[in-house]
Image: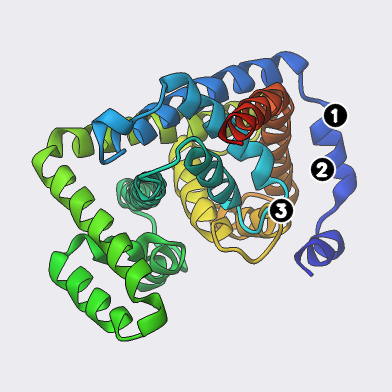
Amino acid sequence: MSVYFLYRSVDFTLVVKGLSSVNPLIYIATVMLSLVRNWLCGIRWELLHPVRSERLSRWFYFRLSMLSHLFNLIMPGALGGDIVKTVYAVGERTSNRLNDVIAVFVDRSIGLLSILLFGIFALTVMRVQLEIDFVYLLLLFVVSGGGALVFLNIQIVDWVERLLCKIKPLERIVTSGFEAWKNALGFYRVNLKLVFGSLALCIPIHLISFTIYYILSVHLGYNIDFLSIVFSVAIMWLITALPISVGGMGVRELSFVWLLGMFNIPSEQAVTLSLLAYINTLLISFISLPLLLDVKKKLDREEVANE
């Protein structure tokens, strides 16, 4: 539906013209920036693993951060790759697998929180009145996964655990899961430097994403200032995190049309920027394909060894 709406409302001859005018060197530059971003994402994921002795290699975290781009193309929402990388991370172990799930969960929650803060900061600095309510931004953040942050409160965790344990078939699973989560909370409280360190890493991680869009807009001669890019990309990310389309397709472009339209940017320019960023993701996915084979071979070897 969203793709059809775009087709009817956007002049794609202008979009194709914009896409074809991009210098290949720009793709090389943006891909290199994306590689740095993925390396930093891997470090953030590593820092948030609640048991230091169970952390895997930094190369492993980078590899799965790269592969998440590949699976985002075929999974619901723009964060579907997180599910797959969690499965791979869990497959690396025979015990204590819940800690890997927790690490991805916390990593994603911090990512969502930080990018929302970037969007609000940009809007505050610009001091412009847009047709968007803060309450809607908060609601969008909650439904995109940020609401999971309420589980940082131990009283809420205990209450939810007691409630779910009333379902007898689930009692054992619920008890083990919540025990792991409480242990993780204890680790994060004792190691606040790691939590703040992961938050600090969000600054270069998100700035790289915003810079990629800005480089593309400047190269194409679009009159879009950096703060407008920051706000629009931040909110667009929250919207596409919702599992309402495959890989965020269509929803991503419509969101960008709406958000940049608030700054009087033509729809064709917004769609062109969105598609160029998507091409960047495709290139990263192509680069990550050999890493997929590497992971598969390792899992196959472990499966044979277990037999």
Characterize the local packing of mark 2: few (<14), some (14-19) or many (20 or more) Cα atoms within 10 angstroms. Answer: some
The picture places residue 78, in percent across and down from the top left corner, at 60, 51
The picture places residue 154, in percent across and down from the top left corner, at 15, 65
Characterize the local packing of mark 3: few (<14), some (14-19) or many (20 or more) Cα atoms within 10 angstroms. Answer: many
The residue under the point 22% across, 49% down is 184
Q: Marks 2 and 3, how far apart in space?
A: 9 Å
Residue 56: which quarter of the image? top left
Tell me, yes or no, whether the two marked residues, 2 and 3, touch with CB atoms within 8 Å: no
Q: Earlier in the sequence, mark 3 or mark 1?
A: 1
Q: Amino acid at mark 3?
A: Ser
Residue beneath disc 1:
20
Q: Amino acid at mark 2?
A: Val
The residue under the point 37% across, 50% down is 98
For the residue pair 180 and 137, the one nearer the viewer reads as 180
**Marks 3 and 1: which is nearer the front?**
1
88 left or right of 15? left
The residue under the point 82% across, 26% down is 21
Q: Marks 2 and 1, how far apart in space?
A: 9 Å
Residue beneath disc 2:
15
Label 3, secondary structure: give it.
helix
Q: Quadrant of the C terminus?
A: top right
The picture places residue 119, in percent across and down from the top left corner, at 39, 50
Q: Is residue 36 above or below residue 243?
A: above
Q: Earlier in the sequence, mark 2 or mark 3?
A: 2
Q: Earlier in the sequence, mark 2 or mark 1?
A: 2
Q: Is residue 20 visible?
A: yes
Residue beneath disc 3:
267
Q: Residue furthest right?
A: 13
Label 1, secondary structure: give it.
helix
Label 2, secondary structure: give it.
helix
